[in-house]
Image (cartoon, rainbow, N blue to C red):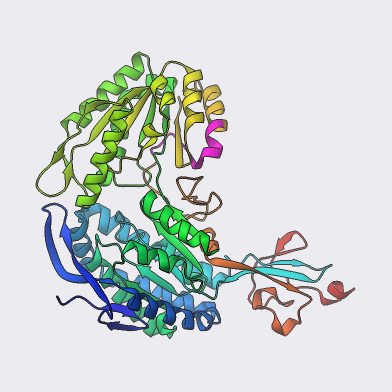
Amino acid sequence: MATQPLLIDGEWRAARELINAFRAENPATGEAIGPAYPVSGAADVEAALSAASLAASPLAATPPERVAAFLEAYAAGIEADAEALVELAHAETALPTQPRLANVELPRTTHQLRQAAKAARSYGWTQPVIDTAANLRAHRAPLCKPVLVLGPNNFPFAFNAIAGSDFASAIAARNPVIAKAHPSHPATSERLAQLALAAVRETGLPAATVQMLYHLDPSLGERLASDPRVGAIGFTGSRAGGLALKAAADAAGIPAYVELSSVNPVFLLPGALAERGAALAQEFYTSCTMGSGQFCTNPGVVIVPSDAAGDAFVAAAREHFAAAAPHVLFSRGVLEHLQRNLTILRAAGAQLLAGGDAGAPGYRHAPTLLSVDATQFLREPRALQTEAFGPVSLLVRVRDQAEMLAVAHAFEGNLTGTLYTASHGADDATATALTQALRPRVGRLIGNRMPTGVAVSPAMNHGGPYPSTGHPGFTAVGMPAAIQRFTALHCYDNVAEHLLPVELRDANPGGVARCIDGVWCLDPLDKQALHS
């Protein structure tokens, strides 16, 4: 079977070792669409890794201005091709063209690329530090090795392995990227790769700055993740897949930044429910079913008091879920995984309130609402925190503040935790106690809004404690912090001025903000003070 070519070392070339082939599917119908794409073998992986390794040092030495120009040219190319990209992504994911793909996700993607360009141009990610007394200088620097990026199924643009935040972050730090596209949207990824290559050529970056493979056998992916030529890994996807890659990378001493799973607990406090319970039921339903619930920040567990206002909320939410038609999921695999995890939740004591059934045609599942009391949740906290990736949420009914706090303390690490409180202050004491319980368990604490949606901001933390991610100290969204994952800390001890990176030189010719003797400033160094 003829398959689409791979992007290797600046060229589109046929797979050297074709293990298998696959086609995308239209999730709304279950039918195969588009051309066949290769499942690559070891020869293709070696070709990409060898080319990227040779490009790493030249790219690290490239002026930041040219890297920024690439990111901006790529963003402009995506915008110019937006209509075709949106149609491809819609066909492969069934996500709506309006507003999701055209008005939200594609603009977010180009915004991320331009934020990365700004950070590259300003050296904002390098964090230069100078100790004048010891004549020590340090900064964040390129890894001088390629970064392996593996994208998820749920964001064909904003987290795509060849266009998303991990990609932009690694490139801004001047590292080549080997992108492993997600098989749910190969044609979308192929078109993005074509635009990326055009921008590489336009701006004169090394040919292997951007490369892409479509699919690998998991064992070969683990071999790639453990190859000492790889500098770091960025992964978004399933817990099982991410942990397997992380184990392989850990064994080889390679940093792996993996986003795994999250149920994103939402606490509805009594005063908030009494004040606006019906509105919260609508807001919850909308958040849970947005994008067919296929968000890593979906509100997967909602804690609800067992009082009259809580009962009214549950009744309203149940009505919303029961009235909804089945939603289209990304693939057969997503549907099967969802059904498997619903079985786990119900076996652990969760009661079905609404939904629970698959639909047709294609890969569909009804919005599903489950409920369990706090006593049972605390008996089976691990099973009842199983992520049901789709339009599904579990309500946990609590009798009082003590049970609510006990439930909060039972949560694993999550990307987000949310508190809904009364506007008049009636819930403030409980919210304070919950904040203390949740703060070490969530990357982002949210007040009075649902967790779906991740702002592309320098202040954003899209990360969290294990098992939401593999490391609590990093974010996958927001420049310059996201860039720092793909850097090395370089220190210079009494090194001659002409051998220093530009942002560490006395005169500070680039006008970079630097921490000099504990104070951030833009000033050049006073040489007389330095050597006195």
| Residue 318 higher or lower than 42, as above or below | above
- Residue 466 in the figure: left or right of residue 532: left
Q: Position of residue 162 (x, y in %)?
A: 36, 68
In the image, farthest residue toward the right: 532
Point out the image quarter for the N terminus. bottom left
| Residue 136 higher or lower than 157, as above or below | below
- Residue 140 in the figure: left or right of residue 160: right
Q: Nearer the viewer, residue 305 or 255?
A: 255
Q: Is residue 113 visible?
A: no
Question: Residue at 47% of width from left, 73% of height from top?
Answer: 146
Q: Nearer the viewer, residue 141 or 284?
A: 141
Q: Position of residue 305 (x, y in %)?
A: 40, 19
Q: Which residues are magenta?
A: 437-450
Q: Position of residue 505 (x, y in %)?
A: 71, 77
Q: Quadrant of residue 488?
A: bottom right
| Residue 330 higher or lower than 514, as above or below | above
Q: Nearer the viewer, residue 146 or 163?
A: 146
In the image, farthest residue toward the top: 308
Question: Residue at 37% of width from left, 65% of height from top?
Answer: 221
- The answer to whether residue 441 is magenta is yes
Q: Nearer the viewer, residue 511 or 419?
A: 419
Question: Residue at 40% of width from left, 84% of height from top?
Answer: 207
Q: Quadrant of residue 285?
A: top left
Question: Residue at 30% of width from left, 54% of height from top?
Answer: 154
- Residue 66 in the figure: left or right of residue 280: right
Q: Position of residue 493 (x, y in %)?
A: 76, 73
Q: Is residue 142 visible?
A: yes
- The answer to whether residue 20 is magenta is no
Point out the image quarter for the C terminus. bottom right
